[in-house]
Image: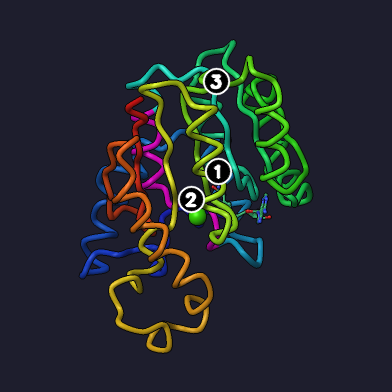
Amino acid sequence: MEQSGKKNPSKGLLQSEELYQYILETSVYPREPEPLKELRDITATHPKAVMATAPDAGQLMDMLLKLINAKKTIEIGVFTGYSLLLTALSIPDDGKITAIDVDRQAYEMGLPVIRKAGVEHKINFIESQALPVLDKLLEDKGNEGSFDFAYVDADRPSFPGYHERLLKLLKVGGVIMYDNTLWGGTVALPDPSLAPQGRKSCWKDCIEFNKILAADTRIEISQAPLGDGVTICRRLY
Ligand code: SAH
Ligand code: CA
């Protein structure tokens, strides 16, 4: 079942769907590693497939991981594992990913592909709410300032709470990437009642969080309109 090349209108924020497809088909899909394609096809059968990280945002994430030589990373929101497998393929063989999700079943859907790709040994999957795991990590002083990279893709209302904890866990110069920060483009609407049904919830959380990031002097940021909008943050001090 080859679904990789099909249109995926829900993920494009660009004004023209054709331009988004052009980007995917010209620069993203042809360079997407085979295991990621396979995982994307398996995920397409999941009723919530739309939640998976957009391949164009994934390509940027892969680039960032390599530019900063990320070795120790953390991921909040695994789902079937597209961004997790991507990270596992990007970091070195002795790299480690702490991956947190409340849904082990979704993770297990992608696990055979992760195993086949030979990268399962880099992953520590923790089935849990994310906040208590971050607090637990912070109880060990050795974890402070030790992570190179964090990817946050779950539970919008908790983003400010994740942010404070991750800034402690991240080393200076480390990077946090937040997904869905443009919330289908609805963050520009004057009122959530104008947003499509699925975008009414968390609309306010997204807007508030974007303001928090913009005002946070501890980081540099870049808001990239890829996928559903990603914000890249670099810890300054
Ligand atoms: N990064 C994934 C997509 C994540 S979708 C990919 O590339 O495919 C969001 C995920 O967050 C879901 O799997 C959901 O189970 C998980 N989630 C929601 N609330 C959570 C919480 N409080 N703590 C941890 N995981 C949570
Ligand atoms: Ca997402």
Q: Is residue 178 magenta?
A: no
User: Magenta-highlighted stretch: main secondary structure?
Assistant: helix
Question: Which secondary structure, mark 1?
Answer: helix
Q: Residue at x 21, y 69 (%)?
A: 16
Q: Nearer the viewer, residue 46 or 210?
A: 210
Query: In the rendered image, which quarter is residue 236 located in?
Result: top left
The residue carrying mark 3 is: 72
Stretch in magenta: 50-64
Q: Amino acid at mark 3?
A: Lys
Vertical arrangement, residue 169 with respect to residue 141, above or below: below
Vertical arrangement, residue 150 with respect to residue 48, above or below: above
Label 3 packing within 10 angstroms: few (<14), some (14-19), many (20+):
some
The residue carrying mark 1 is: 82
Residue 45 is situated, as x and y percent measured from the top left of the image, at 64, 61
Q: Residue at x 47, y 66 (%)?
A: 205
Of callouts 2 and 3, which one flags the residue occurring earlier in the amino acid sequence? 2
Q: Quadrant of the C terminus?
A: top left
